[in-house]
Amino acid sequence: MTTSILILGASYGSLLATKLLMAGHRVTLVCTPRTAELINRDGTVVRFPLRGRSELVELRSHDLPGTLRAASPEQVDPAGFDLAVLGMQEGQYGEDGVRQLMARLAAARTPCLAIMNMPPLPYLRRIPRLRAELLEPCYTDPSVWEAFDPALVTLASPDPQAFRPADQPKNVLQVGLPTNFKAASFGDQALTALLRRLESDIELARLDASGERLEIPVKLKVHDSLFVPLAKWPMLLTGNYRCIRATEIIPIREAVHGDIVLSREIYDWTSQLCIRLGADAADLVPFEKYAQAASSLLKPSSAARALFGGASQIERVDSLVKRIAQQLELSNEHVNEIVGLVDARLSRNRLAQEPVAA
């Protein structure tokens, strides 16, 4: 059965789009008009590392059995889609054009699967122990999420790492760490069944390459537990945000392995926070497995690069974890230090962007 899927965000979103196209589904990518023109003309290109091969395997959307189109936000009617995938950075949902599309998504009651580091507020409202209204200051524009039914919103941990090569056009993506999207079930059983069908379709899909049927990594894994996607939080606090120092940024590998004892302490504390919320230890990733994966992450995190590139806003999972801890009457000095460093750099960037008085 062919499914129509809307994906907001043509960069990271093209990774999941490619896997859905391999399985024969219809995908529409939402992006800027210029990028939409490029994709509609040339398609997308996603490069995957495969075990046992020295060269990357390149998947071009034009060669896959599914159909792909790209559109700008104002061109999209979400009522015509079975599922929407939220693949943009959190701050982008409040931008003109995208904000209006989000309002149409909520009104159409289109089920939404987020593949964001920052969980949508309606997803957090599904967690009984949380007062989501107290977490709104962590969001660039929390009003974007007000009209969404929490039962129609779920989250997948965006574990796969991918980037746009600097010397390539915007329709090209390269996968650095080919792990899986781990999705929590919806509050609605029929919608969870849809996710499981997509999971199966992606699992069975193969790439025909010169007579060889290749299994391409990065799968969709659907879990009953609401808390499985929270497994990304210890990773972000231990690695991604600790790339940010007062005057410089460092690679994720250095952030984790530069002081492995402290890294384990932060990781375990954040994991225990997730367990206090309701997660089972089996929902989370052991520190040893994460540390091994981090050893191959040779660049600073995207959040760190954005901050030191002058960004005035980034996704604030660090602040979210700190505020959730406060609700549970917990605190960690190292997490507080991380939040302080990010706050300071954001303040500096925003001050630099203020117009100079005449």
Image: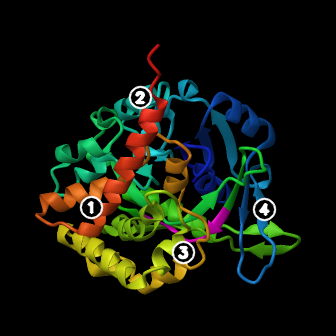
Position of the N terminus, as image quadrant, is bottom right
Q: Nearer the viewer, mark 3 or mark 2?
A: 3
Q: Which residues are magenta?
A: 175-182
Instruction: Please name the amino acid that badge 4 sits on.
Output: Glu
Question: Residue 67 location in percent, x, y?
Answer: 69, 45
Report the residue marked by disc 4: 58
In whole angstroms, how far apart are the C-alphas of marks 1 and 3?
A: 21 Å
Residue at mark 1 to residue at mark 4: CA–CA distance:
42 Å
The residue type indicated by label 3 comes to Arg
Q: Residue furthest front?
A: 358
Q: How many marks?
A: 4
Q: Which mark is residue 336?
A: 1
Alpha-carbon distance for marks 4 and 2?
35 Å
Question: Of the residues tagged 1 and 2, which is closer to the observer?
Answer: 1
Q: Which residue is mark 2?
A: 104
Return the disc, 1 or 3, that comes first in the chain's sequence. 3
Mark 2, secondary structure of its residue? helix
Residue 340 within the segment the image draws in magenta: no
Q: Quick check: can you spot residue 188?
A: no
Along the viewing direction, whichever of 343 and 105 lies nearer the viewer:
343
Q: Residue at x 21, y 55 (%)?
A: 323
Which tag, 3 or 4, sits closer to the chain's start? 4
Disc 2 marks a residue whose amino acid type is Arg
Q: Position of residue 318 (x, y in %)?
A: 34, 57
CA gap, disc 3 and disc 2: 41 Å
Q: From this viewpoint, which residue is outermost toward the left?
A: 329
- Classify residue 131 as left or right of residue 156: left
